[in-house]
Image (cartoon, rainbow, N blue to C red):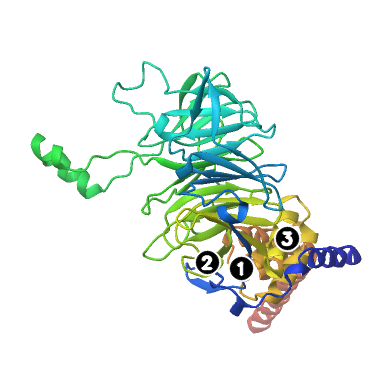
Amino acid sequence: MKVRSWLIVLAASLLISGFGHNVAHGAPYEGYTYNYWGNSVKSPIAFLPSRVITGNDAGTGAWQSPLDLYAAHNGLLYVLDSGNGRIVVLNDQWETMRVIQHFEHEGKQDSFLNPEGLFVTESGQIYVADTENRRVVELNSDGTFVRAIGAPESDVISDTFEYFPRKVIVDKAGRIYVVGRGVYEGLIEFDSDGRFTGFMGTNRVQFDPVDLFWKSVSTKEQREKMIRFIPLEFNNADIDEGGFIYTTTADKNTASAVKKLNPSGIDVLRVNGEFAPVGDLSINRSSFIDIQVSGNGVYRALDSTRGRVFTYNEDGNLLYVIGQLGNQKGTFKNPVAIESYGDAIYVLDRDLGQITEFKPTTFGGLVNEANRLYSSGKHSEAATLWQEVLRLDANYEMAYVGIGKSMLREGKYKEAMTHLKLGNDREYYSRALAKYRREYMREYFGIYMTVAIGVLVSLITWRRIARSRNERGARDVAN
């Protein structure tokens, strides 16, 4: 087992050795995470910028206000060049494969008008949220027109409803989910035939109790002038392999900036830590603008406030933070979309009209691989890599927790308690403590009972002897 564990470490190191021990002073931003108490703690850089591409580099001319990005399963990268009303398709070498700008529709040439969202299925079907044309357009992989899905039609929809699709995702069954501008009822859901089936995952109404009180005692005219309590609208969405939909809400004051919706529209996002995935915990909170789901339950949220990417695992624990606003390579002016493929992360900058690619450092590669192993049930192998993570960052709480959980599964309860305490994981520490107590009592119960019985027998014997002596003494006095 030890040989196998060290082989895993060696393999992981070789996989990321191309990025070596990238030193912090070479990065345009600092690495950090948050501890149990909500304080930011410095951490090694997890990802560094590796290359940047613009429209001119790709040979298509400058990209004008690009708003979305999609990394397909075959490695192709789709750029929604919104200002130019086109889609640019790049291969893994960042060479332009095709440009989709016009398509034939009902015998006429048609085009996009300020599109904001893009999605590509595994089979290569392209869905575009053609915002100002108020429709979702489906194209074949070669750019030929398939159909257009217009505004939803239903008796439950108000006559004042305006349909401006901003983002679109599609599940494996062909159901289409649309994020609409100014739509507070949730995601707009269509079946595979493009028929409206309802709204999904409505955000709960956020209100201030003080405002609620004043509304209750105000006149009708005064109430009309007050802010209405309405749900928060989604601003982006992504879907994982299991069909769960992840959404973001831009409001900085909500505790549910990220949601994970099951097929019934219920939020099932796991939050094991002390803080929900809301980005920065400072006074100036993060405002998420995009979300991207990777494998093994990992998801990344893009913050438009400071231009940072927050990566969380399936338990809602923050793994690392990369990026920031700035003028250097690896920083952004106005980041709007995030994608990943393999071990690379891509961030699209609207104002600069460029994509920045990030690759993992030794630290980032170890964290990703350790988390992958743990998520797939290989806890002992994951623990070996978490030990390597601690050599690079002795304050990384997730590593202590990972090792502690592994030891808990192996029955090493006392060692598990030590690591879980260092990782400030109260829930699993309590589990380890309960099991340790049970094991301790099982092991030493016989000894304790033997001692207890011996003490009890000795006490009874001593009392009998004392009583006998007292009785003899009393008889002697009487005689």
Mark 2 Cα shell of 10 Å, populated few (<14), some (14-19), many (≥20): few
Q: Secondary structure at mark 2?
A: loop
Percent across and percent down for residue 84 are: 48, 43
Q: Amino acid at mark 1?
A: Glu
Q: Amino acid at mark 3?
A: Ala
Percent across and percent down for residue 305 are: 41, 59
Q: Give the residue drawn at x 76%, y 51%.
A: 377
* Disc number placed over residue 369 in the picture, else none: none
Q: Secondary structure at mark 3?
A: helix
Q: Which residue is mark 2?
A: 36
Q: Are marks 2 and 1 in contact (CB under 8 Å)?
A: yes
Q: Amino acid at mark 2?
A: Tyr
Q: Give the residue drawn at x 61%, y 68%.
A: 397
Is residue 264 visible to us here? no
Q: Which residue is mark 1?
A: 397
Mark 3 Cα shell of 10 Å, populated few (<14), some (14-19), many (≥20): many
Relative height, residue 440 to residue 169 (above, below): below
Q: Give the residue drawn at x 44%, y 48%.
A: 256
Percent across and percent down for residue 245 are: 55, 38
Mark 1 or mark 3, earlier in chain: 3
Q: Which residue is mark 3?
A: 370
Question: Depth-wise, is mark 2 or mark 3 nearer the camera?
Answer: 3
Distance in Å between CA atoms under marks 2 and 3 = 20 Å
- Judging depth in this view, the residue of 287 and 139 nearest the camera is 139
Mark 2 or mark 1, earlier in chain: 2
* Quarter of the figure with residue 479: bottom right
Distance in Å between CA atoms under marks 1 and 3 = 13 Å
* Quarter of the figure with residue 118: top right
